[in-house]
Amino acid sequence: MQNRTTKRLTGPQMILLGFLIMVLVGAFLLMLPISSKDRHFTPFIDSLFTSVSAGCVTGLIVKDTQTSWSLFGQIVILILIQIGGMGVITMTTFFALFTGKKIDLRSRTAMQEAVSAPNIGGIAKLTGFIVKGTVLFEGLGAVAVMPVLIRDFGVLKGIWYSIFMSISAFCNAGFDLMGSTGACSSLVYYKDDPVINIVFMLLILTGGLGFLTWNDIKTYGFKFRRYSTQSKIILVSEAFLIILPALYFYIFELSGEPVKARVLESLFASVSPRTAGFNTVDYNSFSGSGIAITIVLMLIGGAPGSTAGGMKITTVAILWASMISVFLRQKAPALFKRRITDDVIMSAIAVFLLDMHLFLAGSIAISLIERLPLMQTFFECASAVATVGLTMGITSTLHTASKIILIIIMYGGRVGGLTLVFAATGRKNSTHDKYPADHVAVG
């Protein structure tokens, strides 16, 4: 017989609780001597930070993954990345289906909210599609980079590195095993390698497009007109968010590089901030403008219902459409000849403001605690709240208070601001419709 408290849990509360249990179990396992290469206990704050970063598919680290964690520790991190990328609810729903258990309405509702599905119908089929697609893309990615990594690290390490980093890239996690090429060096060693760059960019984009978009692509092929409005917004916005920043990086930030490396680095610097966390350039070499553009890309993130974080492409697109509709004195914004409803606009505003509050509050607090320039803490906190994992090299030097702030921001960024609020407010549904309307001037 189910516990009454469990029965009363809403979908957002189930998501919140699932992630919390996962990161706490991960932190406990990473504390154990078997998880570290020196076979000593890892301080709880460092294991918790690593667990939250992996489970929330962020990629910020306080210890280099390859040089600090044993094979057991790396496996724990990889499992956290895989569960965090696909979602705790998705994984539990899949295992329930796999074992033949019936999925009740509450679980279906939680799954719908976890993947941002438009309706509850077909959730079981969608879950199977997500798991199969994830395994397929991660497997293809691992096979594609395996020859390069076997060449550089030997057979066993090459195979393990390929599997680990393919899963990390598809889940937009940013964890890597390149410590032997330089601590926390990410993919800088492969900045001009076309295979590594192209495969990882494709994995990042594939995971970041969202499972519903891939379902549209699978169902309708190249018939773009038949895609859902959400998929159209995501694909068109994605093109702009890759091409325009890449041109900027190519012209202004990487002019000293050879053409081949310059093209690959520019594209990678445009793709990875949304929200993978791998890097082929040192961000400390970027100008203030380049850092600012990267921060904006991180905050935007990927698509809803994907492995990526951020405030999401659709949120930003809806805010832009709303702004333009006000300028043109239109009654409602529209995208692809579809009117955007008031509740969607309000949700977009709420997500934007929640993420900006987390981002600004965390940045200012860490700047005050660590006495660091705001631009550096802006970068680090944008990376945390959008679950990106890019860094300017300050995370490992932070004091405990600052690490706790980043942990809270990463957790809030992954489960989502609205999920946090809805979990806290439960089923309350008060309305202000009974109040008389009034006009308030803005702008």
Image (tube, helix red, strand yellow):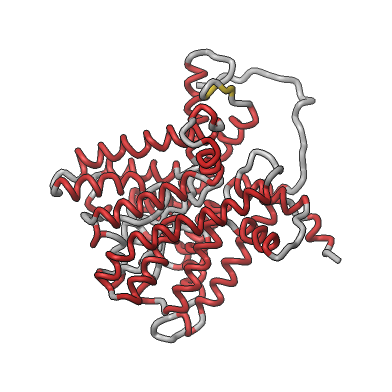
Residue at coordinates 41% horizontally, 76% vertically from top-left? 69
User: Residue furthest toward the right?
Assistant: 1
- In what quadrant of the picture does the N terminus appear? bottom right
294 on left or right of 75: left
Say if residue 376 shows up in the picture.
yes
Residue at coordinates 67% horizontally, 48% vertically from top-left? 123
**Quarter of the view holding residue 293:** top left
15 on left or right of 303: right
The residue lying toward the viewer, choosing from 139 and 246, is 139
Residue at coordinates 58% horizontally, 53% vertically from top-left? 415
User: Residue furthest toward the bottom?
Assistant: 39
Say if residue 361 shows up in the picture.
no
| Image location (x, y in percent) of residue 210 | 51, 45
The residue lying toward the viewer, choosing from 379 and 148, is 148
**Quarter of the view holding residue 341:** top right
| Image location (x, y in percent) of residue 423 | 69, 51
Residue at coordinates 48% horizontally, 30% vertically from top-left? 224
The residue lying toward the viewer, choosing from 148 and 266, is 148
In this picture, is 221 found above or below 284? above
User: Residue furthest toward the top?
Assistant: 329
| Image location (x, y in percent) of residue 67 | 34, 76
In this picture, is 20 found above or below 311? below
The residue lying toward the viewer, choosing from 62 and 171, is 171
In this picture, is 76 found above or below 309? below
| Image location (x, y in percent) of residue 132 | 55, 56
Count numbered badges in the picture. Answer: 0
